[in-house]
Image: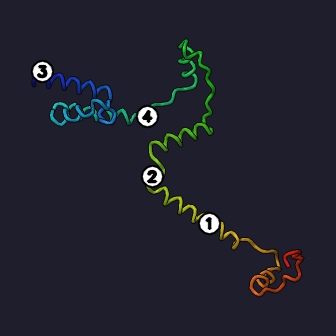
């Protein structure tokens, strides 16, 4: 292995140890070089395989949330952080729900971007059907069904009502 290859492998190892095995996490300016070096060097591919396994284990760890007492002690131990006013966070509140929705929407959108107009038209159609059919489910006052049918289809019965200027 030449000195240039050793320097490249050293730099590649620094890159992988600092940013992990995922190329999208590497600095944009070094991605092209790192990818070409990885394809050209079996040692770099071996190093990347080991880093991939480490990344897998780190990603699978569940880090417990620090207790409020520990958080307060850490903040109190720092003179700079102790000056920042802290408001209590509710365990289950609207703020936490909205934060979860924001994180979820960024990580995995609910609807694919291209299908959103189709879903909007479908939702409008369903809403129109539900609103239009709402009259079918409303019940007329007891005993007036025949009179309503006669007024609608036969035309009789309107003379009983005071229509004012509409006559």
Give yes or no for contact between labels 1 and 2 (Cβ–Cβ under 8 Å): no
Foreground tag (1 vs 3): 1
For the N terminus, the quadrant is top left
**Which residue in the protein does label 4 denote?**
62
Q: Which mark is residue 128?
A: 1
Distance of label 4 from label 3 (alpha carbons) = 41 Å
Among numbered discs 1 and 3, the one appearing first in the sequence: 3
Distance of label 4 from label 2 (alpha carbons) = 31 Å
Give yes or no for contact between labels 4 and 2 (Cβ–Cβ under 8 Å): no
Per the image, label 3 sits on a secondary structure element best described as helix
Up the image or down, 74 lies above or below 103; here it is: above
Per the image, label 1 sits on a secondary structure element best described as helix
Q: At x 60% / y 37%, what residue is drawn?
A: 95
Q: Residues within 10 Å of mark 1 (few under 14, many from 20)?
A: few
Q: Residues within 10 Å of mark 2 (few under 14, many from 20)?
A: few
Among numbered discs 4 and 2, the one appearing first in the sequence: 4
Q: Position of residue 36 (x, y in %)?
A: 20, 35
Among numbered discs 3 and 2, the one appearing first in the sequence: 3
Q: Position of residue 77 (x, y in %)?
A: 54, 13
Q: At x 27% / y 30%, what residue is drawn?
A: 30
Q: Which mark is residue 113?
A: 2
Distance of label 1 from label 2 (alpha carbons) = 24 Å
**Which residue in the protein does label 3 denote?**
3
142 vs 60, nearest the viewer: 142
């Amino acid at each position: 292995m030449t000195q240039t290859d050793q320097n490249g492998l050293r730099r590649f190892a620094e890159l992988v140890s600092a940013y992990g095995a995922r190329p999208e996490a590497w600095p944009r300016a070094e991605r092209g070089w790192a990818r070409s070096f990885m394809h050209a060097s079996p040692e770099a591919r071996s190093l990347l395989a080991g880093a991939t396994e480490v990344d897998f284990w780190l990603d699978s760890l569940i880090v417990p949330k620090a207790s409020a007492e520990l958080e307060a002690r850490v903040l109190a131990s720092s003179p700079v952080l102790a000056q920042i006013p802290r408001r209590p966070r509710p365990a289950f509140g609207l703020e936490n729900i909205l934060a979860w929705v924001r994180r979820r929407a960024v990580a995995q959108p609910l609807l694919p971007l291209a299908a959103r107009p189709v879903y909007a038209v479908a939702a409008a159609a369903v809403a129109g059907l539900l609103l239009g059919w709402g009259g079918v489910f409303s019940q007329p006052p007891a005993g007036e069904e025949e009179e309503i049918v006669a007024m609608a289809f036969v035309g009789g019965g309107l003379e009983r009502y005071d229509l004012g200027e509409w006559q």
